[in-house]
Image (cartoon, rainbow, N blue to C red):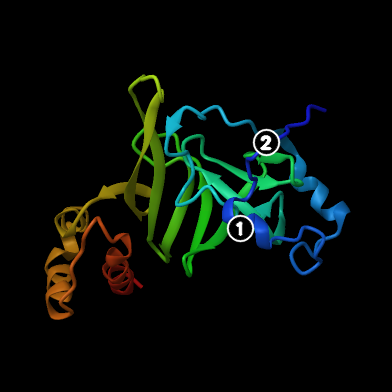
């Protein structure tokens, strides 16, 4: 097996490392044997040292979370989400980071800045539909997902090879079909038969649907589902 060692002065967990005791059973309560199946992946090596920013969602620090893996649920796991490669990472020890086998990862969740995020893995045959991990904002008869990703703006200088920038798409899932949405106009176009009711609901409740706040779409989608029970 190839072992990955961090360079001198680097840290595996950012500022969180100072307070993380990997021998503490309250942090890692699972038995070693149970945890071994999580290590069914490959060692991670950072290929973007010369890029401004990083490939991770929200932070490069490992966050406390839960992973659904090969039919089992692992709690109290430290995870990090690479949205450039759409991969999940966990620390194996202080010197090794494992990229989890995506074929076996079914879901994961974590808390960042007192907010919980839940992701599931979806597959699609359409280029227009989300594929990989999506953040679940709402699931009922319909669903509302957010797909995060990072792209690279290439600009080679003496100091860097480029920089990362983050984008995301909000998807309204209706009858198994994914529709990208940016505002109320998109929702009304998709739900043409319920357009009048939808607009009235938004008006009465003084709602503002904005792409900047993906959660703002949830009350409308929930209301639509209530019309079709």
| Residue wearing tag 2 | 8
Q: Residues within 10 Å of mark 2 (few under 14, many from 20)?
A: few
The quarter of the image holding the N terminus is top right
Whether residue 176 can be seen here: no
Residue 163 place in picture, x, y as percent = 37, 32
Residue 32 place in picture, x, y as percent = 86, 54
The quarter of the image holding the C terminus is bottom left
Relative vertical location of residue 139 with respect to residue 54 in this rendering, above or below: below
In the rendered view, does 50 fall on the left or right side of 226? right
Say what secondary structure mark 1 lies in.
Answer: helix
| Disc 1/disc 2 C-alpha distance (Å) | 18 Å
Q: Quadrant of residue 143?
A: bottom left
| Residue wearing tag 1 | 16
Say what secondary structure mark 2 lies in.
Answer: loop
In the rendered view, does 125 fall on the left or right side of 180? right
Relative vertical location of residue 127 with respect to residue 161 in this rendering, above or below: below
């Amino acid at each position: 097996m190839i072992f990955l060692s961090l360079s001198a002065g680097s840290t595996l967990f950012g500022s969180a490392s100072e307070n993380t005791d990997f021998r503490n059973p309250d942090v890692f309560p699972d038995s070693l044997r149970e945890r071994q199946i999580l290590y069914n992946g490959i060692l991670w090596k950072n290929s973007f040292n010369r890029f401004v920013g990083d490939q991770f969602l929200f932070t490069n620090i490992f966050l406390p979370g839960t992973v659904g893996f090969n039919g089992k649920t692992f709690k109290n796991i430290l995870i990090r989400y690479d949205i450039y490669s759409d991969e999940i990472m966990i620390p194996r020890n202080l010197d090794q980071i494992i990229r989890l086998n995506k074929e076996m990862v079914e879901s994961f969740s974590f808390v960042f800045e007192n907010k919980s995020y839940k992701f599931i893995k979806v597959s699609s045959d359409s280029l227009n539909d989300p594929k990989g991990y999506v953040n679940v904002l709402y699931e009922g008869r319909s669903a509302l997902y957010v797909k995060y990703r990072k792209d690279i703006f290439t600009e080679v200088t003496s100091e860097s090879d480029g920089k990362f920038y983050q984008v995301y798409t909000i998807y309204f899932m209706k009858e198994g079909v994914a529709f990208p949405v940016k505002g109320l106009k998109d929702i009304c176009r998709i739900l043409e038969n319920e357009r009048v009711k939808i607009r009235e609901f938004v008006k009465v409740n003084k709602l503002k649907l904005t792409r900047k706040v993906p959660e703002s779409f949830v009350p409308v989608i929930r209301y639509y589902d209530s019309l079709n029970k």
